[in-house]
């Protein structure tokens, strides 16, 4: 059986259980369609429904749908191909998936409803339905939460086909990261660096999985910096790039930080990189991701101490919330069909969820680590004055050190990890970079 056929089998089994438990005979997963800008006829870039691409790697087929009848093991794909002389259709390569599904080409959505007839009344619809005729379809329920929870909980465990796609996505992104690094050291502007990033993978901007963060100097302290200067600054000190790629619908999310020259900031990058790699050795089935997050905070506290940012000991800096001012975001998140993949708060398939942590409100993964999960590990350390204000005047912090780091912004290192047995994990990101430097 091909990897895709195995994947499809797993997806079908998951839907079988989910539909059985939530009282539906079938599911209709609509791919979606582009939204049009206000008072305009220009469509925004189309983004496919993630649960549609879970079934078939079709990223550019709006107005299509997958119909799955409980227990059938085989979906029907209604592939929309309009007779339309204004536009050309996305090319769909001949691939294994076409052999594994029942494929029906439609040029009108009424062909789908005619084909399904009364079955629709026992069907759960999954997708966006802001437009006609989809909004009027006579389905049993639209996006029922219990069904979604069931599917989202199970999506945390990736199939081998999904892991292979994530591997390829990391290879694409790593190649582009190296092009961006070269552009930074060549003194290019943030916008020009991003153009090199896209060109290295042959992507248009709407195809990247999230707005790339391409930040020179103090811009790297802005966690989601994406406004891009069009001219390089007079002095290039530091570079942080957080940028991804997509392969068959699966996302990469990689961050690297670079120093222009040896010295204080370069040492800080090296220290955070070493701490991140040490943390990777703590990832084992049964460990709670929250505990990994706390462990990372303590490592950051030790770096703060080692580099002279704090006068107190590392443990006290954590207890007093000082590490949260330097690293406000979560250690990471699930990744897969979505960059911030779903299910990080779910306790079980029944939809019970963990309470968000008050101590670490931006941590979006609270589950126990399990074999087959894929998540990011992305510690950072930044000068964010809005957060440091809370400690203004405190002698716990050596402010001259903060002033020294401010012109460099911050540091973040982000890899994606596949959890294996007994800590035998795969680092998709570092493996991808290693493969490139070998070749
Ligand atoms: N690039 C977004 C994130 O790292 O979560
Ligand atoms: Mn991330
Ligand atoms: Mn990222």
Image (cartoon, rainbow, N blue to C red):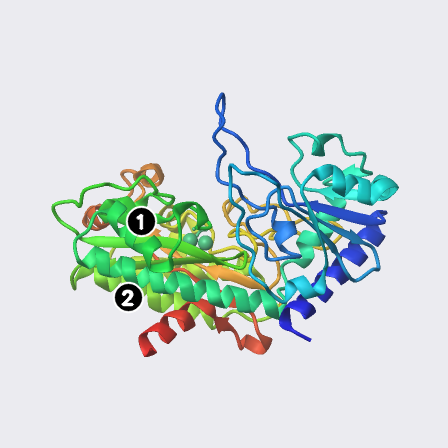
User: SS at mark 2?
Assistant: helix
177 or 272, which is in the foreground?
177
Q: Which of the 4 image quadrants contains residue 394?
A: top left
Identified at 62% across, 59% down, the residue is: 156
| Residue 243 position within the rendered picture, expressed as x and y whole percent measured from the top left | 38, 54
68 or 240, which is in the foreground?
68
Residue 66 at least partly seen: yes
Report whether 44 appears left or right of 276: right
Crowdedness near tag 1: few (<14), some (14–19) or many (≥20) residues, C-alpha within 10 Å = many
The residue sitting at the left extreme is: 234
Report whether 215 appears left or right of 255: left
Identified at 69% across, 70% down, the residue is: 6
Q: Which of the 4 image quadrants contains residue 72?
A: bottom right
Residue located beneath label 1 in the image = 214
Residue located beneath label 2 in the image = 270
Identified at 54% across, 50% down, the residue is: 364
The residue sitting at the top extreme is: 39
Q: Which of the 4 image quadrants contains residue 239?
A: bottom left
| Residue 347 position within the rendered picture, expressed as x and y whole percent measured from the top left | 68, 54
176 or 257, which is in the foreground?
176
Q: Nearer the viewer, mark 2 or mark 1?
A: 1
| Residue 194 position within the rendered picture, expressed as x and y whole percent measured from the top left | 30, 50
Report whether 11 appears left or right of 325: right
């Amino acid at each position: 059986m091909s990897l895709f056929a195995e994947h499809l089998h797993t997806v079908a089994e998951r839907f079988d259980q989910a539909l059985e438990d939530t009282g539906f005979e079938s599911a209709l997963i609509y791919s979606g369609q582009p939204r049009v800008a206000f008072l305009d006829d220009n469509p925004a870039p189309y983004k496919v429904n993630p649960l549609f691409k879970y079934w078939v790697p079709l990223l550019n087929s709006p107005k299509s749908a997958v119909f799955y009848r409980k227990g059938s093991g085989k979906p029907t794909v209604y592939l929309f191909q309009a007779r339309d002389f204004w536009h050309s259709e996305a090319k769909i390569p001949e691939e294994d998936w076409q052999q594994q599904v029942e494929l029906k080409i439609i040029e009108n959505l009424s062909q789908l409803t005619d084909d399904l007839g009364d079955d629709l009344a026992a069907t759960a619809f999954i997708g966006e339905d802001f437009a006609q005729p989809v909004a009027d379809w006579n389905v049993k329920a639209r996006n029922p939460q219990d069904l979604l929870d069931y599917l989202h909980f199970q999506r945390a465990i990736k199939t081998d086909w999904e892991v292979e796609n994530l591997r390829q996505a990391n290879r694409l992104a790593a190649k582009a990261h190296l092009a961006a690094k070269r552009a930074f050291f060549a003194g290019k502007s943030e916008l020009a660096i991003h153009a090199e990033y896209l060109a290295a993978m042959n992507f248009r901007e709407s195809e990247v999985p999230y707005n790339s963060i391409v930040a020179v100097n103090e811009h790297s302290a802005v966690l989601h910096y994406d406004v891009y200067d069009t001219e390089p600054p007079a002095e290039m000190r530091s570079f942080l790039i957080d940028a991804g790629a997509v392969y068959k619908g699966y996302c990469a999310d990689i961050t690297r930080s670079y120093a222009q020259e040896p010295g204080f900031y370069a040492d800080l990058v090296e220290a955070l990189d070493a701490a991140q790699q040490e943390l990777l050795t703590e990832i084992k089935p049964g460990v709670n991701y929250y505990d990994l997050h706390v462990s990372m905070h303590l490592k950051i506290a030790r770096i703060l101490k080692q580099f002279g940012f704090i006068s107190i000991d590392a443990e006290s800096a954590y207890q007093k919330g000082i590490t949260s001012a330097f690293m406000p975001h979560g250690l990471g998140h699930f990744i897969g069909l979505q960059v911030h993949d779903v299910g990080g708060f779910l306790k079980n398939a029944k939809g019970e969820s963990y309470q968000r942590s008050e101590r670490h409100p931006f941590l979006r993964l609270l589950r126990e680590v399990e074999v087959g999960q894929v998540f990011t590990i992305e510690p950072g350390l930044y000068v964010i004055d809005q957060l440091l204000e809370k400690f203004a005047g405190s002698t716990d912090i050596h402010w001259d050190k903060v002033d020294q780091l401010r012109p460099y912004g911050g540091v973040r290192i982000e890899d994606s990890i596949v959890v294996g047995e007994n800590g035998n994990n795969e680092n998709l990101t570092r493996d991808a970079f290693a493969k490139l430097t070998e070749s």
